[in-house]
Amino acid sequence: MPIRRRRRDAPPDVADLVRQVGAVLDELRLTEAEVSVGDVRVRVQRAAAPVGAAPASGAAAPPLGDQVVIVERPGNMVTLEAPMVGTFYRASGPAADPYVREGDVVKEGQIVCIIEAMKLMNEIEAKTAGRVAKVLVENGQAVEYGQPLFLIEPAR
């Protein structure tokens, strides 16, 4: 399965890359795969079956939710990670403009998104000043604790 890129010099869409690697894991019944595209390296690892539990004949691989995703970035980028489990929102409401877009300059402490957890809307702030290089999560997507949300190129 070829890795799709928007432009020849554009970095790969990380979420799409993880989905593609997950599909390869399912197709080939693997527990781990690692892919490098440019300076982005993604490793997807499935949880191993419990000791003594043999998979039934014809059993499917663990669902996509049982995987660990590790994304490595260039050294100059800062990854803003989800501080909690919840639902990621780029804006304060469905008709509102996103807090930030790729290419926007942000200040430390500026609100960049919301994570809804247990019916509470939690404002997530930038931990460093810089330029938003990449939004790694789709609006309305469920996120896990520690999942990368944004890549920020720090201000010099």
Image (cartoon, rainbow, N blue to C red):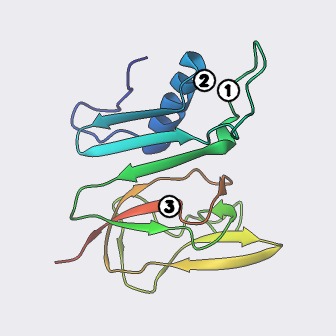
**Residue kind at label 3, given as amino acid type:** Leu
Q: Mark 2 or mark 3, which has the lower sequence index?
A: 2
> Residue under circle 1?
61
Q: Mark 3 or mark 1, which has the lower sequence index?
A: 1
Cα–Cα gap, marks 2 and 3: 25 Å
Seen in the picture, residue 134 relative to 115 is either above or below; the reply is above
> Is 61 on the left or on the right of 77, as rendered?
right
Question: Label 1's element?
Answer: loop
Cα–Cα gap, marks 3 and 1: 27 Å
Question: Label 3's element?
Answer: strand
- Point out residue 102 in the picture as x, y percentages from the top left corner: 39, 58
Seen in the picture, residue 11 relative to 105 is either above or below; the reply is above
Seen in the picture, residue 6 relative to 86 is either above or below; the reply is above
Q: Quadrant of residue 43?
A: top left
Q: Mark 1 or mark 2, which has the lower sequence index?
A: 2
**Residue kind at label 2, given as amino acid type:** Asp
> Residue under circle 3?
149
> Residue under circle 2?
26
Toward the top, the furthest residue is 58
